[in-house]
Image: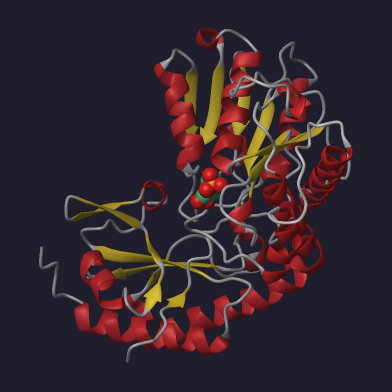
Amino acid sequence: MPLDPPIYLDYHATTPVDPRVHEAMMPWLTSSVGNPASTHLHGLRAAAAVDAARSSVASLVGDPAPSRVVLLGSATEACNLAIRGTVDAALPRSRSHVVLTSIEHSAVAKTCAWLRERGCGVTVVGVDSRGIVSVADVMRAIESSTVLVCVMAANNEIGTVQPVAEVCDAVATINRRRRVPVRVFSDAVQALGRVPPPPSDLVSVSGHKIYAPQGVGALVIRGDVRLAPQTVGGTQEGGLRAGTVATPMAVALGAAADLMVAEGDEEAQRVGSLRDALCERLLSGLGDDMVINGAWGGPDHAALRLPGNLNVSLPGVCPLSLGDLVRSHVSVSGGAACRSGAAETSPVIKAIGGLDATRAATVRFGLGRFTTLDEVEKVAALFIAAARRLRGIGCST
Ligand code: PLP
């Protein structure tokens, strides 16, 4: 049954631009002009639009008056600025130490690995089989030289929500006794607008996960955190990120943040119900032939998982064959990367002790603002049929 056009269920990878966001940014691509750093009227108007966008991002992060909202080209840039910026502003790299969880996005994990190669101490803290880090484990990993703890707000593959508020409280307690404070950075790209925002010192934001275009992000800085800039040149963004601020992108980010603040709770309910419906349908068709990855069920069900996320493994199904079979009907992501024709298990699935890519296909379903029940039903039927057809056949490559 071809589903034409293919159904899009990959909202963790990127979200469509909301037409209202598009409408808000359009004048800044066409009729309105101005460099926000210029002091003439056009420049001042652009600066006002950019500052309004900053306030909207601050509201989305749950802090009407953060020290600074640095506008950037992506959340990856925000992660780099938060991590490398904190380390470079604190002790010499060789005497600094950073803690991160084992399920961070590569924007965080690889930045920390980059620092490790340059002499910085790095400790990776594992997660439990539900994909949630323990606050006690994080605190045990902190050393006298620790300057930063990175705990993502919600995971991009299995959607698990991390206990960031508890980590922040525990870190605040030990900071009272420390000369060099430990800062908490949360990559909140997937969480914002869907679950409560993290109260961390540093929070990353990505436009294209909240229905703004690709190519815009922000780092929200709270309190007296000191950062060393990672892009030098002009004095934009308080000297923290040289380069002309992209006014249309900033306006889009602000409009997307406003919509999330106004509609996020209701949307989370609706999307969560659709995600639960998808899971129920898949379970009724596949039963024990499907394993749900990450925290699922129980009284904390809604609090422990992003509403639009469902991640499942299908034992005995070859990931590559499944991809070939469903690709023209539905866009989803696998928990495995394909390298040289063989599937590789994702680090997140490994971190929770999930089924590896030689034994199961792993699928991440990402639902969002424009997903419908009809789409969910079609996708469930497609995957049930595909899994039944492929089980036990093995990979042809
Ligand atoms: N962090 C997480 C959790 C993500 O899911 C992503 C994107 O997939 C990023 C960071 C990077 O965001 P960007 O594409 O804006 O650089």
x and y percent of residue 147 in the render? 63, 20
Q: Quadrant of the C terminus?
A: bottom left
Q: Is residue 352 visible?
A: yes
Q: Identify the residue at horizontal 81%, vertical 43% (top origin).
A: 46
x and y percent of residue 210 in the render? 65, 59
Left or right: where 387 falls relative to 268:
left
The mark tally for this picture is 0
x and y percent of residue 143 in the render? 58, 18
Name the image quarter holding residue 7.
bottom left
Q: Is residue 137 visible?
A: no
Name the image quarter holding residue 284.
bottom left
Q: Identify the residue at horizontal 56%, vertical 56% (top origin).
A: 160
Q: Identify the residue at horizontal 17%, vertical 50% (top origin).
A: 340
- Which color scheme is applied? secondary structure
Work out whether 224 lies above or below 332.
Answer: above
Left or right: where 200 falls relative to 107:
right
Left or right: where 284 falls relative to 368:
left
Q: Identify the residue at horizontal 57%, vertical 23% (top origin).
A: 84
Work out whether 375 lies above or below 365.
Answer: below
Question: In front: 21, or 196?
Answer: 21
x and y percent of residue 104 in the render? 50, 42
Left or right: where 283 falls relative to 219:
left
| Extreme residue toward the left, this view | 396
Q: Quadrant of the N terminus?
A: bottom left
Work out whether 115 lies above or below 318.
Answer: above
